[in-house]
Amino acid sequence: MAADVTASESGDSGAAAVLAQPSPLAAFWSAFGENKGAAFGLAVFGLVLMLALAADLVAPYSPIEQFRDAVRAPPVWETGGSWRFILGTDGDGHDMLSRLIYGARVSLFIGFSVMCVSFVIGAALGLAAAMTGPVVDTAVTRLMDLIMAVPSLVLAILVVAVLGPSLTNTIVAVTIVYLPRYVRLVRASALGELNKDYVTAAKVAGVGPFRLAWSTVLPNCLAPLIVMAALGVSDAILEAAGLGFLGLGAQPPTPEWGSMLADSREFIRSDPWIVTLPGLAILITVVAINLAGDGLRDALDPKMRRG
Amino acid sequence: MLAYFLRRLALTIPTFLALMFLTFIAIRLVPGDPVEVRVGEHGISPERLAFFRHELGLDLPVWRQFLDYVWRLLHGDFGVSLATQQKVLTEFLTLFPATLELSFFAMAFAVIVGVPAGAIAAVKRGSVFDQALMTVSLFGYSMPIFWWGLLLIMFVSVRLGLLPVSGRIDLITYYFDQPTGFMTVDALLSDQPGAFLDALRHLVLPAIVLGTVPLGVVARMTRSSMLEVLGEDYVRTARAKGLSPGRVIGVHALRNALLPVVTVIGLSVSGLMAGAVLTETIFSWPGVGKWLIESIGRRDYPALQGGVLLVSAVVILVNLVVDLVYGAVDPRIRHGR
């Protein structure tokens, strides 16, 4: 179990600056770098992240500016395409490239928001279930069972039906859908840790319940939680794009990748780039995150390493 | 054994109750007065309003309303659709076979392609095939399936003209009774030449789209489970006694490797239902997923409420059956917690 402790510390350093401990971090990086797929995924993801952050500088136009003179202009490599709109324009005359770049911002924002909120709430509920006794435990576990029983997109649809479609409500809906994974994982790992000597020692030393949960138990459950959070970003992006596609996510003219595809069906015959490009953006981002997430899992926990 | 069954059954009851509570509360939270939704917004006297509130039971305390709701559900009354004035349960039962048929073929596609591919990848570990399959599988479970569906329609149906774009069958050419609701079965029963083939042709693209994510998962799971089994002593014994490699892999290894794969298949029912919402929307497939989306669009909340409840109930029941079958097959599960 000593390996777990170091692993979770090194994982922590990925987010916070625990650079004072170079050895676990270096070990983590070398394990991560061994996996070429993971390194590639991280590089691609880094690129998408940079584009999202620097969208104002990189994107040639505003994502909601309409060029009435150039509706459905083809991309540069097609006949009739020009460098004015490198990836062409959509049915409303928006520049595709600009919308895709700003779309990265929207999708990553959704992905990270869902991850952060479910991480915090999931950890809190999971620890509460594991540590506060059978009543809370049963209530939380039953609630999570219920959420798991409703198919993800169906539950998200129900939430959006109640709250109304918007970017914020997409985040709420997707968070609710993915919360049980975090809660169950934290609860299970916490239950495993609670019987260990160091927890007993902390209790004997008079550590209060909150401190025991957050500072003593939680750090030792972090390794699998970080892996799940990383992979959860890609799931959240996919789910949100699905909602957007159904018209239940971010509303136009927000440049969200899924909603960009919602009305694209009519262009299948005539202007295929309107259909292909947003989906390609989703696929590339999700594949990159999944590759990097797999690498993270292999690096953080050798026991979980795939054959 | 019986104790395990009963315990597992008993655990399902609170989940069902909670599910009823969830749908009850959700519809209550929808903005807008249910009476106004029903009778229109303008021109209603306070007396009429009170009458309607009484009629709908809205003047009762909330806990009474919930009990009434549960009572109605237990008697098979899932409400009436505002859009079609049909019973929600009837609508669901008419549409569900379409979803079931699609899900079945999607899962069949995932298993028929995924299991052999995963097994071969494990046997030829590290080969080009293995690496290619792992890449395909990664793309499979990373796929935004609504986009994948659009791409397939674009290339296979529109450009190449190979397969139909939408629907379950060519309704102009073929018309027959649908006693089972499963188009392939009904087409066979109808004795109309070509009907069965046409139903199958309509199924190909939707089944591939819905089966893509499960395919990625099944292939990966088969591979890793197979790798584990191939290292077991009994496989070495089988090899040592001189059995042919095909027999060792096919009979001794694969059969044992399949148990975790079956778990994954059982657990993917929920994912299939979620994927069906998107797939049915893309291919205009008249199933419950498309119906739910249309109900939202029409603000048909009784249909939405009943639909969510029924779809989830199906998932809970399937998971229950999977668990019970496991308990019967594997004693470790029944005795463990």
Image: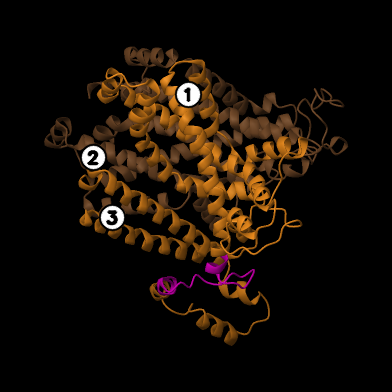
Chain colours: A brown, B orange
Look at the picture and state if B134 lies above or below B201: above
Position of the N terminus of chain A by quadrant: top left
Mark drawn on residue B8: 3
Q: Place residue A306 in its image quadrant.
A: top left
The reply, left or right, for residue B321 in relation to residue A174 is left
Look at the picture and state if A262 lies above or below A104: below
The reply, left or right, for residue A177 in relation to residue B232 is right
Q: CA distance from mark 2 to mark 3?
A: 22 Å
Mark closer to the observer (3, 1): 3
The residue under label 3 is which amino acid type?
Arg
- Residue at 84% x, 26% y is A81
Q: Which comes before the other along the chain, label 1 or label 2?
A: 2
- Residue at 48% x, 23% y is A292
The reply, left or right, for residue B134 in relation to residue B166 is left
- Residue at 44% x, 74% y is B72
From the top left corner, tell me how far across and down residue B149 is, in percent.
65, 40
Q: Is residue B73 magenta?
A: yes
Mark 1 crowdedness (10 Å alpha carbons): few <14, some 14-19, many ≥20 = many
Q: Tell me the residue that label 1 is attached to.
A: A292
Q: CA distance from mark 3 to mark 1?
A: 38 Å
Mark drawn on residue A191: 2
Q: CA distance from mark 1 to mark 2?
A: 29 Å
